[in-house]
Every structure is written in structure tokens, then in C-alpha cells.
Image (cartoon, rainbow, N blue to C red):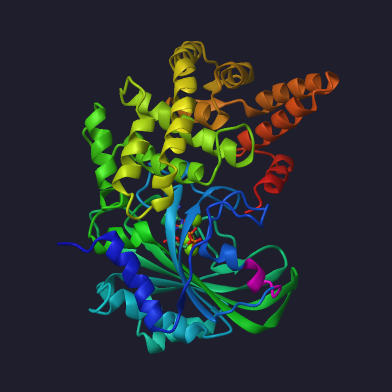
Amino acid sequence: MSISSDTIRNMFLNFFLKKNHHIFPGSPLISNNDSSLLFTNAGMNQFKDIFLGKKKSQYSKITTVQQCLRTGGKHNDLNNVGFNSRHHTFFEMLGNFSFNGYFKEEAISYAWELLTSPNYFNLPKDKLWITTYAGDQQTYNIWKKKINIPSNKLIQISDKKNKKYESDNFWQMSSTGPCGPSTEIFFDKGSHLQGFPPGGDYSTGDRFIEIWNLVFIQFNRINKNNLIPLPKVLIDTGMGLERIVSVIQKVDSAYETDLFLFLIRKILDISKINSFNNSSIRIIADHVRSSVFIISNGIVPSNERQGYVLRRILRRAIRHGNKIGIKDLFFYKLASFFIEKTKENNVLLSEKKDFIIKVIKKEEQQFSYVLEKGLLLLKQKFNRIKNNTLDGESLFSMYDTYGFPIDLVEDICKENNFKIDLIKFNNLMDQQKNRARKNNNFFQLNNLKLQSKISSLFQGYVNTKIKSEIKEIFVN
Ligand code: ATP
Ligand code: MG
Ligand code: MG
Ligand code: MG
């Protein structure tokens, strides 16, 4: 029998407890004291002030399980969800942290021991690949000489922004402040899956998956060219629970692990699909998890900030339900099923179940009411489409009249190999904004401004001005 995800989570915490770490609770998904971040997206978020030297930690070594959401800003994985087996909107990050306690050698040795020791995860060593930062010879030498990683599985990633690399292995919180090199640990899931080794085109397949990222914060960046050593060095690591569970349970995707399987089976039951690998099934399963956790933090669907992220997630899931032939309201029932099934682990969800279900049901009823009509209209528009591009007016009416978030329309267009005219859409948004301004309707004005920025987030060819504005809202 394979090891359960609960056991794996506990093994992680207990391993670091044995290495004298303090087990510390994860922070809420929505930060109370960091308005620059819509959602917690990494284990280190709650320690930001310690990293910045503004606060002292009571403990020098800490281990946590952190609930994360990556739907915007620097970490926007929303568009990948469903189309690969490793990116989720909501996931749990297992982490160990050291504040001037230990550094590279110990952090690497701990990670290696936990992953490969027969007493712990017992992974085959020859399936593990490592990337380091090209400027960090120290880390390279530890992997090479101490851990004995063969050269062909030890890849140095250079600073150059090569599009092929998803990461340049140098971490920084922002343009100045604490920063340092990182090293990533990958697992090779086997040649029956597609994909290139790290350092190649990692984004194309699920064969090599990044499981753990260790960050060595040792510098303070004064400006673009100047780094000075920090008096106190820090360790920040993160391992995706869903990913390590898929490796240990020896399945190709996280959706086949015990974290998702019961939910996937239920969705298959109520749909006309019988394939595991169907992207709609995966998107719905993923979005059940993210939406219930978001709502459990008191967020309800709205047109701004976290509420708009939630609305987009819910509407996207509902549309995918429709796509796979589910006729009745279904999403709130799945949410209820998920909360019931996981109540032992998620007491908070269970306590807020009635509220969560009520919120989802209301949004589902509202959107389902216009969805069919909207989809029909869109189909008619597709029949008359010119230049393979859906025009701005149509986009605007889908958004304005039918409540289709722009990324949702874009999704449907992509499925039909059409592009969207976002420039014209933004233009129409601006005009509506001006009308609102003239009417002195500040509330409407602010909403529109925000929505147009958020909606721009998902299209491929945003200009730099919009991009920098988006950054302002989604500084993650
Ligand atoms: P990737 O390159 O695969 O997008 P990342 O380098 O962006 O991952 P980190 O910021 O290093 O991820 O996060 C630490 C760990 O969290 C990763 O090594 C991975 O195991 C896990 N992780 C990151 N993003 C996701 C996600 N969207 N869903 C599930 N797990 C994730
Ligand atoms: Mg990423
Ligand atoms: Mg990465
Ligand atoms: Mg990483």
C-alpha cells in the first residue's frame, strides 16, 4: 500500500522536528498585514519581516505547511492548471526555514536525507536531478562532492534570461533587499512521459518535475549592480505537497493521488467523461479546492481583488462543467462533498461549510443563468468571425452583459483557435470608465478600472504600460 498524503506531510514535519526545528502553523491564505499580496503564495511570506530584518524570530529553525494560491502576479499558474499535472491554483507548500541557524551544507544534506533515506521518502537517487545558480560554486560543490551527484544530473542555470528556463535560480523579494542563489531538486517520472531535463524546455512536459526549491539568502541588494553580504544568512525552502505525493505514490499526476482521486472520481460520476486526463475534469477538481479555501477566509465573489480572483475561478469551473455535459448545478455539491471528505484535516472548512456552500451556490445560480445564453451568443459570433479574431465589441458585451470574465472568453476562443482583440476591448472599457466619470460615479469607476486591469492580466500581448499597472495590483 502506498503512503498516504497525511503521512507524507507528517513525515516532513517530524523529520525537521528531529533536526531541532520548531513546528510552526502556516499563515492564513490571505495575509492580514501584507496588502501588497492578494494571496499567500509561499511558505516564506509570513516570515517576510524577519527576512527584512524588521522583526526577530523567537526560533532560529522553523518548519511549516503553508497553504498557497498562485493565481496572479509573479506566480500566476492559473492558465497551466488542467493542462499539466503539476501546477495547481491551490497547493500546500512544505518548508523548512533557518534564521541565522544553518546554511547551504545542512539545508542540502537535510533535503537529500529526507528524500532518499529508506527511513523517510526512499526515492531512487538516480531519478533526482539538481539545478544550481551558475554564480554559486559553493552550492555546486556541495552537491558534487558531498552528495555525489553525477555531473550530467547537476545543471548550472545562468543569469541570462533564457526563455527556455523557467527560473534563473536567483531569488529576490523585490528590486532591492534580501536575495540569494537557489537550487532546485527535480524528479524524473520516467520516459513514458514527455519532457526535457531541467535546463532544457522544462515547461513542455510532466516527466521532470521540480519538487523542492532551496533558497540561500545571503545578500542585500542595494541596487541593480550592488550586492552586499547579509550579516545573518537565511534559509527558505519549499516543496509542493501535491508533487512529492505524486512521486511517492508513483503516479503520473497529482490528480491520481489521494489528495485528488476521490474528487476526480466524483466529477467523472456526474459528467459524461470517463478520462482522467481530461483538462475540464482537472480544472474543476483544482478549482473546488481553491474556491472553498478562499471562501473559508471570508472572501466572497466580487469585482475586485481577492473577490474577483474567486469569481473568475468559480465561473471558469462552472463553464468547464457545462463543457463536459453537466446540466444541473453541480459545483456547490462538489464543494460540499470535498469539505465532508476532508473534514478531519480541515476543521476550519468544516466549521464554515454552510457559509461556503451558500456563497458558491449563489454565484453558481447567477452565472448558470446567463452561461447558456452567453455561450450560444458566442457561438454565433464565432460563425461570423473575421481574421480569426473575436472583435472588441463582442468581448465587451460578453463581459458587460453576460458576466464572462475576459480570461474565460479568451479560454473559449483559444479552444476554437481564435484570438481576441484586447486593444479594442480596453478601449471600450476606457470609454465606459469616462462615462462613469462624467456621471461622477466613483464607485463604478473604480470597479471598472480595476476590472480592466485584472482582465488584461491573462492576454498574451499586453503592452508594458498595462503590465506595470497590473504589477501594482498584483505585486506578489
Ligand atoms: P515551477 O517552476 O514548477 O513553476 P516554481 O519554481 O515556480 O515551480 P517555487 O516558487 O520554487 O515553485 O515553489 C516551491 C515548490 O512549490 C516547487 O518546487 C513546487 O514543488 C511547488 N509548487 C510551485 N508552484 C506550484 C503550483 N502551482 N502547484 C503545485 N505545486 C507548486
Ligand atoms: Mg512557477
Ligand atoms: Mg521552478
Ligand atoms: Mg522553484
Measuring from the top left, give residue 231's x and y in whole percent. Answer: 68, 85
Q: Where is residue 426 in the image (x, y as percent from the top left)?
A: 69, 27
User: Does residue 196 appear in the picture of this structure?
Assistant: no
Give the camera-side residue of 210 and 345. 345
Q: What stretch is highlighted in magenta?
A: 48-54
Pick out the residue farthest to the bottom.
145
Quarter of the image for the N terminus: give it.
bottom left
Q: Give the percent coordinates (x, y) of residue 203.
A: 43, 53
**Residue sitting at x 31%, y 39%:** 337
Specify whether 192 is left or right of 370. left
Image vertical order of residue 403 relative to residue 33, above or below:
above
Write the residue at 30% across / 61% down: 6
Where 379 sits versus 243, above or below?
Answer: above
> Where 6 falls versus 178 (above or below)?
above
Residue 229 drawn above or below residue 89 = below
In the rendered view of the protein, which quadrant contains the C terminus? bottom right
In the image: residue 111, left or right of residue 403? left
Which residue is nearer to you in this view: 148 or 1? Answer: 1
Q: Identify which residue is drawn at 50% across, 41% down.
A: 295
> In front here: 210 or 372?
372
Quadrant for residue 54, please give it.
Answer: bottom right
Residue closest to the far left:
1
Q: Residue 307: x, y in percent?
A: 58, 37
